[in-house]
Image: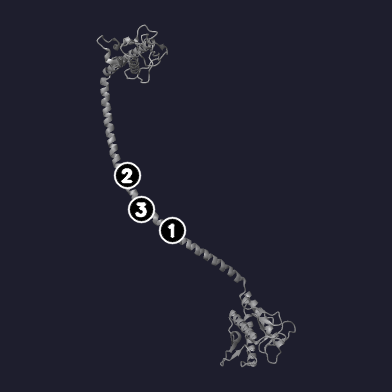
């Protein structure tokens, strides 16, 4: 038959089974510890048929009751110097098998140790030490309990009256505190109502401000749009102003008279606005161009007379391009043509010459009017003899040239016309300087 080997849980000394195989004893102990169990001292009337479970359970209950008297009042587990678990060993009934003995010991170890996973017993010496330690803790706990009871009785006897007064004072203080808290609660209720009313007013004001803000944003957007339009218009106006200023500066530097009437007398024939006035055998000029040049000359003389405020006597200029003429201010109102078409039905050469003499007379009137006043008068380099229709070349011993075509050569007639345009050119300079 095989033996079951055990070792002490605390000192790890081996525990041997007896030779009979029916009881489990300790090698170092003379008296089995299991004999102390009430279950081990059953009477002769107990029969083996009751089974190992009933005998062991009865002993376990008594061991649990006895072990519970050695625990602390708190119900906690007792911890010894080593492990708090212990096992009592001794002789058991001889009618049980080895398996039932092992099962009984394993259940006893679990109940005494309070843990379900312990399967190792204790030796006799470790068991005695554990019991002594538990008795010491039980004695100490009972002494502490007695001290606590005496202190509690002493306090209740000595401070019974003081505690009543203190409780009365505490009650009054609590009542005052309750009254104060009630007042604060009422104030808080009133404040809550006022705050609620203020909150509603603030919400209404917020909504109004939001509506005003949205309206202001719409107004701002509209004004911003108008501002952009006005900015574009302003930029356009500024550009136009700069352009007008540039044009004005150019016009101020520009001589209107010289730009309108361009007279050139440096060639063989004089010209006004690119229309030649006169003709030469070597430079033939059509009479249409000559008539246009006389129309430009008549327009220039009329403009100069208006500039000085002159009202012509005896004649009135009527510039009409190639068909310009002069009208006599007498009763017959005769028209003197400033144009001629040889070989065609039109004004005769004599009427044309009379018109040239009348034109020279008007030019002489302008010269006389321009020389009046305090300001310096016009300086015409070529003297004019309107009665005889002559123009004198400037310089000492200047030769006179007739403006009439009758009994005159083309060279001398063209020279007289050139001298006339030279006087007009000086008149333009005088008017521009004013």
Q: How far is disc 3 from disc 2 in space, using C-alphas?
A: 19 Å
Q: Secondary structure at mark 2?
A: helix
Where is mark 1, residue-wise? 221
Horizontal and vertical percent position of residue 112: 34, 16
Tell me: residue 35, above or below residue 363.
above
Res. 208 mark: 3
Q: Position of residue 412 (x, y in %)?
A: 71, 87
Disc 1, SS: helix
Question: Which type of secondary structure does the marked residue at label 3 adopt?
Answer: helix
Label drawn at residue 194: none
Say if mark 2 contacts mark 1, CB within 8 Å. Answer: no
Would residue 263 be seen by someone viewing this image from the given angle?
A: yes
Circle on res. 195: 2
Q: Quadrant of the N terminus?
A: top left
Question: From where the camera sits, is residue 65 visible?
Answer: no
Residue found 43% across the figure and 60% down from its top: 222
How many other residues sit within 10 Å of disc 2, few (<14), some (14-19) or many (≥20)?
some
- The tag earlier along the polypeptide, 3 or 2, is 2
Q: Residues within 10 Å of mark 3 (few under 14, many from 20)?
A: few
Instruction: In this rendered view, identify the residue nearer to me: 358 or 96.
Output: 96
Instruction: Name the spot of residue 65 as percent of width and height, x first.
Output: 29, 15
Percent x, y for residue 107? 33, 18
Q: Is residue 233 above or below residue 165?
A: below
Which residue ends up furthest to the top in the rendered image?
30
């Amino acid at each position: 038959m095989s033996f079951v080997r055990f070792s002490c849980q605390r000192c790890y000394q081996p525990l041997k089974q007896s030779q009979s195989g029916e009881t489990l004893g300790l090698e170092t102990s003379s008296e089995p510890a299991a004999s102390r169990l009430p279950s081990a001292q059953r009477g002769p009337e107990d029969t083996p048929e009751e089974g190992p479970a009933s005998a062991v359970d009865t002993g376990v209950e008594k061991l649990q009751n006895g072990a519970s008297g050695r625990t602390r009042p708190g119900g906690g587990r007792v911890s010894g110097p080593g492990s708090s678990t212990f096992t009592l060993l001794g002789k058991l009934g001889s009618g049980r098998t080895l398996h039932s003995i092992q099962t009984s010991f394993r259940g006893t170890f679990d109940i005494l140790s309070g843990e379900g996973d312990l399967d190792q017993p204790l030796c006799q010496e470790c068991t005695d030490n554990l019991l002594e330690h538990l008795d010491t803790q039980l004695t100490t706990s009972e002494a502490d309990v007695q001290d606590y009871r005496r202190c509690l009785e002493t306090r209740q006897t000595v401070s019974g009256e003081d505690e009543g007064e203190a409780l009365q004072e505490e009650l009054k203080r609590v009542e005052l505190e309750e009254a104060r808290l009630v007042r604060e609660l009422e104030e808080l209720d009133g404040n809550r109502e006022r705050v609620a009313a203020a909150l509603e007013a603030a919400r209404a004001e917020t909504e109004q401000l939001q509506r005003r803000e949205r309206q202001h944003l719409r107004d701002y957007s509209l004004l911003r749009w108008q501002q952009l339009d006005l900015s574009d218009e302003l930029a356009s106006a500024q550009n136009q102003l700069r352009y007008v200023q540039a044009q004005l500066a150019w016009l101020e530097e520009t001589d209107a008279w010289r730009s309108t009437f361009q007279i050139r007398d440096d060639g063989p024939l004089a010209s006004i606005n690119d229309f030649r006035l006169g003709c030469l055998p070597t430079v033939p000029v059509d009479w249409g161009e000559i008539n246009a040049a006389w129309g430009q000359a008549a327009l220039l003389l009329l403009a100069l007379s208006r500039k000085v405020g002159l009202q012509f006597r005896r004649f009135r200029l009527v510039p009409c391009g190639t068909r310009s003429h002069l009208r006599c201010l007498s009763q017959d109102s005769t028209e003197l043509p400033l144009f001629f078409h040889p070989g065609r039905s039109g004004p005769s050469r004599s009427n044309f010459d009379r018109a040239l003499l009348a034109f020279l007379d008007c030019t002489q009137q302008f010269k006389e009017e321009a020389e009046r006043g305090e300001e310096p008068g016009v300086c015409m380099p070529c003297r004019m003899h309107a009665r005889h229709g002559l123009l004198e070349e400037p310089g000492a011993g200047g030769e006179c040239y007739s403006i009439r075509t009758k009994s005159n050569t083309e060279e001398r007639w063209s020279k007289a016309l050139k001298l006339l345009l030279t006087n007009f050119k000086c008149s333009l300079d005088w008017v521009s300087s004013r």
